[in-house]
Image (tube, rainbow, N blue to C red):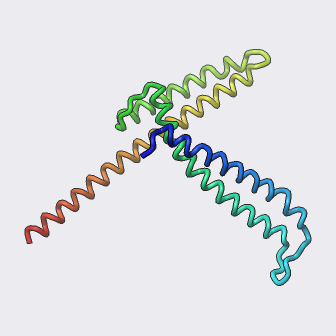
Amino acid sequence: MRSKGEEIRHRLPRLVTNLIMAIIFWLVSVFIPPTLAGVIVPGVNIEASLLVWILTILVLGIFLIRALSDALVLGDVLTDVLVKRLGVKEERSPKRAAKEFAYIIIIVLIVTAVSPLLANIQDVGYYLATATVYIGLGLIILFIYDIGRIIYKIIEDKADSLADRFTQTRQKDKSSV
């Protein structure tokens, strides 16, 4: 198992590379098919521009899926780091999920109260209010993601214990026969 730093050093370049390739294939899908407009592929009666567009979109999708898998791993690592920096203890319990839900409510209330005040500041108020909303949204998404991980871990642990109980019961039944 890799440390968090090693995981970031391994995944971040892959994520960036996959995103760059996705952007390149998106640009290809935008600019190349119009140059092939009106060209019919013999024997298929389909325009070459459509085939090129479909092919580039498929390749774009592959790179986006690869980027998503790296982003999810990096998301887990960065969520752990951010949650730890925010002062939330490491335990994975329903109590922690409830605390994070309370944090979400507090963030919503603070952003709702502060945004109109910031919007009234001349010249930069709109930008400050918008930044406040986006920062609040980012924190809310972080906490919702962590709550989901906690719930998943709890369900996974319960399923494992239930499966262990079934296998123990099954083994007892076999040994008594």
User: Where, by quadrant of the figure, is residue 59 drawn?
Assistant: bottom right
- Quadrant containing the C terminus in the rendered view: bottom left
Using the image, determine if residue 154 lies above or below residue 169: above
Look at the image and tell me whether residue 67 can be seen.
yes
User: Where, by quadrant of the figure, is residue 110 drawn?
Assistant: top right
* Direction from residue 75 to residue 159 in the image, left or right: left
Residue at the (8%, 68%) spot, across then down: 176
* Direction from residue 100 to residue 108 in the image, left or right: right
Using the image, determine if residue 46 lies above or below residue 16: below
* Direction from residue 167 to residue 152 in the image, left or right: right
The percent coordinates of residue 116 (x first, y second) are: 67, 21
The percent coordinates of residue 89 (x first, y second) are: 39, 29
Residue at the (54%, 42%) spot, across then down: 74
| Farthest residue, direction left | 176
Look at the image and tell me whether residue 144 can be seen.
no
The percent coordinates of residue 169 (x first, y second) are: 17, 62
Residue at the (59%, 34%) spot, across then down: 138
Residue at the (54%, 47%) spot, across then down: 72
Using the image, determine if residue 108 lies above or below residue 148: above
Using the image, determine if residue 66 lies above or below residue 108: below
The percent coordinates of residue 166 (x first, y second) are: 22, 61
* Direction from residue 174 to residue 38 in the image, left or right: right
| Farthest residue, direction bottom | 43
